[in-house]
Amino acid sequence: AQKITQTQPGMFVQEKEAVTLDCTYDTSDPSYGLFWYKQPSSGEMIFLIYQGSYDQQNATEGRYSLNFQKARKSANLVISASQLGDSAMYFCAMRVRENYGGATNKLIFGTGTLLAVQP
Amino acid sequence: DGGITQSPKYLFRKEGQNVTLSCEQNLNHDAMYWYRQDPGQGLRLIYYSQIVNDFQKGDIAEGYSVSREKKESFPLTVTSAQKNPTAFYLCASSMHSGGVQPQHFGDGTRLSIL
């Protein structure tokens, strides 16, 4: 079964410190993609970073980096130099392929981690 | 500006009533999706569409219907058969249905029962 697991319901971090949000996944498909999204209290989902299963290097986007450990099936998000505006829900998601019409971008999501950045 | 527009932001449904949530995108994306989010939970896929005039059921399609008559539009109808419709609904789109492309989301619609 394909599944995303986020085991941290909530996290606190001091402003300017780094924080790691955990994500583990389960799939038997050798070709998959892992995404992280941020959801502020206003509700919109903001795409942060993507890691492909065949990518040799860990993905980075500004203050966001993805610690991809394929053998452990983990794709943890690292936020460096936390800012107050980083306070939000963070979701890990995985692209799953469907047989209909070839590959799709269907995503399955974890339950999320609520990050609170303290001044 | 290019983006995804969902309307209305808040919607109230009476018992036995069908309501339609609007989703429009001007990103020229091929694929569009509808998700439902319940409090404290992740997103669950309701329906998705890879091309015009075609759509597929997601994991929780019962009580919902969609249409895709135009590339830019993917409205979702919450029918009276959906017994627990109170939730936050998010529409998304992506550039290609094949390959791995990030999905971009609208701001969502909050639906409540009166």
Image (spheres, coloured by chain):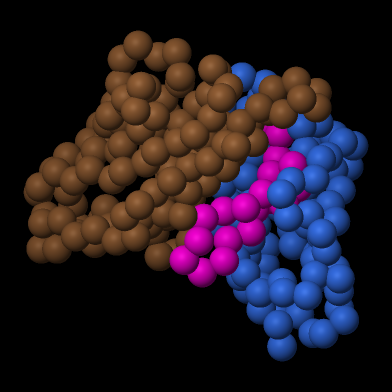
The C terminus of chain B sits in image quarter: bottom right
In this rendering, would B87 be left or right of B61? left
Residue at figure coordinates x 46%, y 19% from the top left = A53
Please tell me which residue lies in front, B112 or A5: A5
Quarter-wise, where is residue A95 in the image? top right
| Chain B display color | blue
Which region is colored magenta? B29-48
> Looking at the picture, how far across and down is residue B30, in whole percent?
72, 30
In this rendering, would A111 be left or right of A62? right
In this rendering, would A64 be left or right of B55? left
Quarter-wise, where is residue B55 in the image? top right
In the image, residue B87 lies in the stretch drawn in magenta: no
| Chain A display color | brown
Residue at figure coordinates x 41%, y 54% from the top left = A112
Please tell me which residue lies in front, B14 or A30: A30
Work out whether residue A12 can be spotted: yes
Residue at figure coordinates x 66%, y 74% from the top left = B86
In the image, residue B33 lies in the stretch drawn in magenta: yes
In this rendering, would A82 be left or right of A109? left
> Looking at the picture, how far across and down is residue B29, in whole percent?
67, 32
Most common secondary structure along the magenta stretch: strand
Q: Is residue A48 above or below residue B47?
A: above
> Looking at the picture, how far across and down is residue A105, in whole percent?
63, 31
The N terminus of chain B sits in image quarter: top right
Please tell me which residue lies in front, A75 or A88: A75
Residue at figure coordinates x 10%, y 63% from the top left = A119
Q: Is residue B89 above or below residue A80?
A: below
Q: Outermost residue, bottom direction?
A: B114
